[in-house]
Image (cartoon, helix red, strand yellow):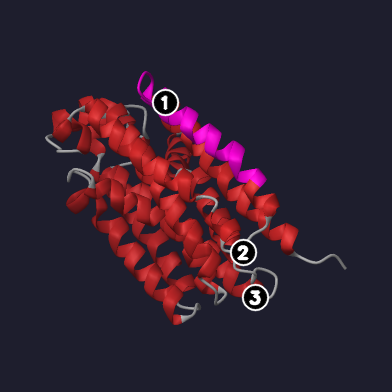
Amino acid sequence: MAGRETGRGLVELVRPVNALAAGVLTLIGAFVAGGLFDSPLPAGAAAGATVFATGAGNAINDYFDREIDRINQPGRPIPRGSVSPRGALGFSLALFSGAVVLALTLPALALAIAVVNLLLLVAYTQLFKGLPGVGNAVVAALGGSTFLFGGTAVGNITAPGVLFVLAALATFTREVIKDVEDLAGDREEGLNTLPIAIGERPALWVGVACLLVAVLASPLPFLLGALGVVYLLAVLPANAVMLWAAATSFRDPTAGQERLKYGMFLAAAAFVLGRVALVPSA
C-alpha cells in the first residue's frame, strides 16, 4: 500500500494532465508553423521534452513550495506524506534529464529555448515567485514558449511567435488570478506577490488589462494574412470565454482562473482550425 501511495503521489507531482497539455501545445506550435507532418521526429522530440520539463518543473516547485502548500494545498503529495521532499527532488531531476536528452536532438534555436526554459523552471520558486509581477511574467513566458518551441523545432517561428505573445499575455492574467486565490498562504510565507504588493482588485485589473491587449491583438494573424477567416470566427468565442473568466475572477478567483484556462485552450484550437483551413484539399 505504501508503494502504491508513493507511485500515486509521484504521478500527482507532475500534474500529468497539465504536462501532457503542454506537450500538445508544442505540437500545435509545430502544426501552426506548417512543419508537424514534414518534420514529425523533431516535433515529437520537442513535445516529449516539453512534457518531461513541465512535469519536472511541477515537481520541483512542489519541493520548494512544501511549506506554503501545508496551508494552501494540504492534499498535495508532499504535505500529506505520500512523497518525501528528497524523493520529489530526485524525481524532478530525473525528469529534467529526460527533457535535456530529447532537446539535444533539436535545432540550435530550439535547444536554446529549452535551456533557458529549464533554467527558469529551476529558478522560479526561489528567485522569481515572490517578486510582484515578475514571477507571473516568468510563468507566462514559459507557458507561451511551448508554441514557440514547437515552431523552432520544425524551423518556422512566424505564426507560432504570434501565438506565443497572445498566450503569454493570457497566462500572465491567469497567474495573477491564481495569486489572488493563494493570497493567505503567500502572505503567511512572506512572499510579495502582486496582490500583496498592490492589493487584490488592483492586481486583478492589471491582469485584465493584459488580457484585453491579447484579445484586441487576436485578429492580427488574420489581418497579416497568416490565417484566414476560419481562424477569426473561431477565436471570437475563445475571447468571450476569457473575458467572462476575467470578470468572474473578481468574485471567485478559483472559478475565474479555471475558466480562463478553458478559454486559452479554445484560442489554441482556433489557431489549429485556421491552419487546417489553409491546407489545400487533395
Tell me, yes or no, if residue 105 can be seen here. Answer: yes
Q: Is residue 272 left or right of residue 191?
A: right
Q: Quadrant of the C terminus?
A: bottom right
Query: What whole-number distance in Å separates the C-alpha atoms at marks 3 and 2?
Result: 24 Å
The circle drawn on residue 39 is 3
Is residue 245 found inside the magenta-colored segment of the image?
Answer: yes
Nearest the eye: 108 or 93: 108
Instruction: Specify the amino acid type for callout 2.
Output: Gly
User: Which residue is disc 1 drawn over?
Assistant: 247
Observer able to see residue 13: no
Q: Is 275 drawn above or below residue 65 in the view shown?
A: below
Q: Nearer the viewer, mark 3 or mark 2?
A: 2
Q: Position of residue 83 (x, y in %)?
A: 35, 40
Magenta stretch: includes residue 179:
no
Magenta range is 233-253
- As shown in the figure, which amino acid type bears the numbered disc 3? Ser
Secondary structure type for disc 2: loop
Q: Percent x, y for residue 1? A: 47, 33
- Few, some or many C-alpha atoms within 10 Å of disc 2 (few <14, some 14-19, many ≥20)? few
